[in-house]
Amino acid sequence: MHPAVVGHRITVDNLNAATGGDAVEDDPDSPVEAFEQNAWRRPVSRLFSENDNVVLYFEIPYARVISPVGSNIDGTSSGKKYVVYEVEIRQVTSDPNPAPTVIKRRYTHFLKLYDDLRKKHALLMQGINFPKKVLVGNFSGELIGERSEAFENLLDYIVTVPSLRDSEHFLEFLQGDELNKACQLLDERRNEFAVPILENTFRVLNKIFLDKSMCVLLLLCRLVAACTTSPIPHPLAEQWAELALRRYEHVCDADLLVLYIPLLQTCLHLWWQRGRDRTLLEERLDQIAKKGIKVKGGPTLTQAIHALDPRAETT
């Protein structure tokens, strides 16, 4: 547990300058949102000593109060204001400024995660304090700071307990919103918008789980499919495809092997498009065929992914 952090308020312009970001997300389909003129900022970054034995930790450096607008005819908001917490997933390294990966979550996301884990793992969640809902003062800097500390502690604890870390509830917290949005974009054939979302989600999972864990490889294959199913393959299609092939070496999980043949077929076609030597890929497929496994006429990579984890895309 670390000391409570209250924080202070800064203007949105200063916050954007500090983070290098824009005030409004550039999602073409996101509802028009107006940020309040104030945003909470963590005054001091978390620090750990060698004795803490911390390898991975979560930090909420910023929180923004958002008010939906444009719902009424006069342009005023008919929705409720809410706070978005920017959660950074950081690894403790010798690098003085290791690049974090960021996800944005609301209080309701944390509450659902806490409730789901408490129902499934009551004993493991004993003693975990979670901030209660309040009717007044939801947007005060003090409350946002207190909640940020509680959320950081909750996530820090989860990743240290295998049963909690590997739960479907934690995985859904980490990727659910982004994955559903990306899959919707894929359904609409707007792969160029889906790919950056999937890239960030892959980096999130890759920091928390093993390289060859099912959730990481499944997301990686979904990323390869997104890069290669548009008329013009994404510029990074080969990079992600090569990483997926390397990750699949020596994988024995039968659930993951069902993706391997479609992945090889996808890479084979991509190599052909780029004029690359396909000998190695063809040899791998031949070796699989000699074992009596069907390698032709099977599902596409997207179809194989959907069979394991149905989302929006269906082709």
Image (spheres, rainbow, N blue to C red):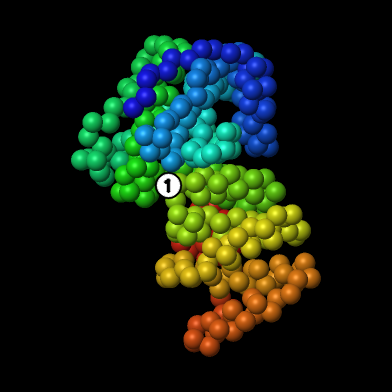
| Residue 46 visible, this angle | yes
> What residue is drawn where x is 52% and y is 69%?
249
The residue lying toward the viewer, choosing from 112 and 203, is: 203
Which of the 4 image quarters holds residue 116? Answer: top left
Instruction: Left or right? Give the position of 146 relative to 16.
Output: left
Residue 281 vs residue 304: left or right?
A: right
Q: Is residue 226 above or below residue 296?
A: above
Q: Is residue 38 above or below residue 181?
A: above
Residue at left 20%, top 40%? 123
Q: Is residue 218 visible?
A: no
Residue 299 against residue 302 in the figure, above or below: below
Q: Quadrant of residue 223?
A: bottom right
Q: x, y (%) of residue 163? A: 30, 49
Q: Residue furthest left?
A: 123
Who is closer to the viewer here, 203 or 115?
203
Q: Secondary structure at mark 1?
A: helix
Question: Which one is in front, 282 or 188?
Answer: 282
Q: Residue at x 63, y 62 (%)?
A: 241
Counting from the top left corner in percent of width and height, residue 30 is at: 62, 34
Q: Amino acid at mark 1?
A: Leu
For this orientation, the residue located farthest to the right is: 275
Q: What residue did someone put label 1 on?
A: 171
